Image: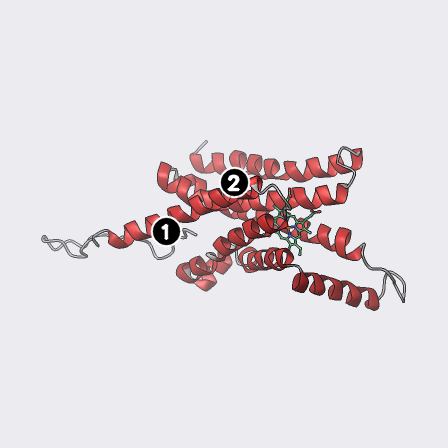
Amino acid sequence: MTANQLVRFVAKPVVFLSALLPVAWIVWAFQAGALSANPLSDVTNETGVWTLRFLCLTLAITPLRRLTGWNLVIRFRRMIGLFAFFYGTLHFLIYVIADRFAGLLDFPDGIVAWSTVRNLLAAIGEDIYERPYITVGFTAFVLMLPLALTSTTGWIRRLGGRRWQTLHRLVYASAVGGVLHYWWLVKADVSRPQIYAVVVALLLGFRLYSARARAAAPRPSTATRSGAVAPPARSSTRTSA
Ligand code: HEM
């Protein structure tokens, strides 16, 4: 079996199934009554933390690849990034149902009605406007949308490597927003958000450092003395967000 086949038929399915374990555990714990007295809050928190963990894992791929030279790891980045979006979507939907929908006091035309949809959207909009940690969390989630939508090979081709790469730098803002959102919502003990802040700072710091190192490195000349043409320093389609 080649390394390529090993990644495709063994490693990728294993990573995919492993990434589903948190949601499987959440569903099991919820129906088994193994959560706290406020299970909906636990489910919101768990999905939120997993969104942040997957964002950090996505950001860790490029440093891991550069530091170890293990290029195959890049093959997992899209899947892990999409899992960040998956957990973010679950987190947002659970908040919408458990917090906003449950908080609607009256249903003038019954539960399944346009007035309910309007009232729900108004309740979400009000919360985004009034509570800064929700504003930041919502922004972090919205920033993930274009990344998920353009994650396919077709979109990389359509946008071109460089533009795609620039767009996908939004993941940095999303991770920073996720940390701020977490920090802002915890009432007293900020030790857990602090750990994520350090992890995200290190992952972004690595990028800053390697970008500066690359800019400072002498550019190889395109023509050598013997007249042979040297290969380009970087491929224009390489993606390193
Ligand atoms: C990238 C996007 C997001 C990330 C990374 C994220 C992350 C988190 C984290 C880490 C927690 C706390 C977990 C804990 O205390 O153990 C949390 C809680 C929470 N998040 Fe988010 N979040 C995101 C988006 C959102 C959005 C879009 C909303 C709603 C508009 C939202 C609403 C909430 C609420 C209400 C809680 C508190 C739940 C409770 O205490 O009962 N989050 N989130």
Earlier-in-chain disc, 1 versus 2: 2
Asked if residue 69 can be seen in this view, the reply is: no
**Is the residue at mark 1 in contact range of ligand 1, meaning its CB lies under 8 Å from it?**
no
The tag on residue 133 is none
Write down the residue under mark 1: 208
Q: What element carries label 2?
A: helix
| Residue visible at 48% across and 37% down in the picture | 7
Crowdedness near tag 2: few (<14), some (14–19) or many (≥20) residues, C-alpha within 10 Å = few
- Asked which quadrant contains residue 18, the reply is top right
- Dot 2 amino acid type: Ile
User: In what element is the residue under mark 1?
Assistant: helix
Q: Which colour scheme is used?
A: secondary structure
In the rendered image, the residue lying farthest to the front is: 188
Q: In this view, does 117 lie to the left or right of 198?
A: right
* Amino acid tagged 1: Leu
Find residue 25 and report its image quarter.
Answer: top right
- Marking on residue 195: 2
Q: Where is residue 210 in the image (x, y as percent from the top left)?
A: 33, 48
